[in-house]
Image (cartoon, rainbow, N blue to C red):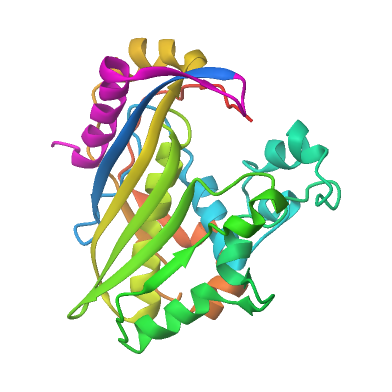
């Protein structure tokens, strides 16, 4: 059976290799092949979970990270406590952040991602819970075409260890169905993008469940998609030579019924992937 979500991912990787331009990345000090503008779609209604099968992908860590965002976490220790170690390096090994006067100490991440989603500060210094407002509006079927949660706060970029890569989520209601469009400024395609795909799909599925709506499609828009020089050999000679297996399915614990549930007791164990066949893992290097 054709694996549509993975084929579009692999086609993007091929496009970067065939059409990409070499760019020197100032933040990481590394070169990367880069293309501008990519559009991915996920059939959430049909439960075609976009989990890579051409390498083993650790979906629970990606979902744990999403839960941390939805709870407004600002510490790598908080993420580790729910099974996600992806923020350790950015918190404690990023030289620019270590020297930043806003860093509060070990494991501090600053005003990143979910902090902005749950405690956005405007120019007047007022705090605003974007996610709670959007959740309430969706539950009340109040689609004012502005059901937006953004992790991008231009006035506070310097107060966090990393500006948000996938920065904005825009929800839409058509009848009894919820849709999602997610915007990403930058995508480490071999290593990070599959995490992002998992999170876009899961976010729509979860928000539909806790607001009593059906799932529609999720649209994932990427501005800058790239492959680092140190990742290129493994992508070309290992992952792209493998045939994908069929797309697995995602099952979410039906007892998750409210945003408060997500905030308090839900863990990655409440998200079960069924029918996941995969090739061996590929250890792509991570650029801090």
Q: Which residues are magenta?
A: 1-29
- Magenta span includes 10: yes
Q: Nearer the viewer, residue 224 or 258?
A: 224
**Which residue does the image show at 69% across and 49% down from the upper left?**
158
Quadrant including the N terminus = top left
**Which residue does the image show at 54% across and 77% down from the upper left?**
261
Q: Quadrant of residue 139?
A: bottom left
**Which residue does the image show at 39% across and 58% down from the upper left?**
202
Residue 235: horizontal and vertical position, in percent? 38, 17
**Which residue does the image show at 66% across and 79% down from the upper left?**
126
Q: Do we see residue 80 in this rendering?
A: no
Residue 33: horizontal and vertical position, in percent? 40, 19
- Magenta span includes 199: no
Residue 80: horizontal and vertical position, in percent? 69, 49
Q: Nearer the viewer, residue 45 or 40?
A: 40
Quadrant including the C terminus = top right
Q: Do we see residue 230 in this rendering?
A: yes
Judged from this view, the residue extending furthest toward the left is: 1
User: Horizontally, is 246 left or right of 141 in the view?
Assistant: left
Q: Quadrant of residue 99?
A: top right
Judged from this view, the residue extending furthest toward the front is: 123
38 in relation to 239, above or below: below
Number of labels in the image equals 0
Residue 100: horizontal and vertical position, in percent? 80, 43
User: Horizontally, is 39 left or right of 205 in the view?
Assistant: left
């Amino acid at each position: 059976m054709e694996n549509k979500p993975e084929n579009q991912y692999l086609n993007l990787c091929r496009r970067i290799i065939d059409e990409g331009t070499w760019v020197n990345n100032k933040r990481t000090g590394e070169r990367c092949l880069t293309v501008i503008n990519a559009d991915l779609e996920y059939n959430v209604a049909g439960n075609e979970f976009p989990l890579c099968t051409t390498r083993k992908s650790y979906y629970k860590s990606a979902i744990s990270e999403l839960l941390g965002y939805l709870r407004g976490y600002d510490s790598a220790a908080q993420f580790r406590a729910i099974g996600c170690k992806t923020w350790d390096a950015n918190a404690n090994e990023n030289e620019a952040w270590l020297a930043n006067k806003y860093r509060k100490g070990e494991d501090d991440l600053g005003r990143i991602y979910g902090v902005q989603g749950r405690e956005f500060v405007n120019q007047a210094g007022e705090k605003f819970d974007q996610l709670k407002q959007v959740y309430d509006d969706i539950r009340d079927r109040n689609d004012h075409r502005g059901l937006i949660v953004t992790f991008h706060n231009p006035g506070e970029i310097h107060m966090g260890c990393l500006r948000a890569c996938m920065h904005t989520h825009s929800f839409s209601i058509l009848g009894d169905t919820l849709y999602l469009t997610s915007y990403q400024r930058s995508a480490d395609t071999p290593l990070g993008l599959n995490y992002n795909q998992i999170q876009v799909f899961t976010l729509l599925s979860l928000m539909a469940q806790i607001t009593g709506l059906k799932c529609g499609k999720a649209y994932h828009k990427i501005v800058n998609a790239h492959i680092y020089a140190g990742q290129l050999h493994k992508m070309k000679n290992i992952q792209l030579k493998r045939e994908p297996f069929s797309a697995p399915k995602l099952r979410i614990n039906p007892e998750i019924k409210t945003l408060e549930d997500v905030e308090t007791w839900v863990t990655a164990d409440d998200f079960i992937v069924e029918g996941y066949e995969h090739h061996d893992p590929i250890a792509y290097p991570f650029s801090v």
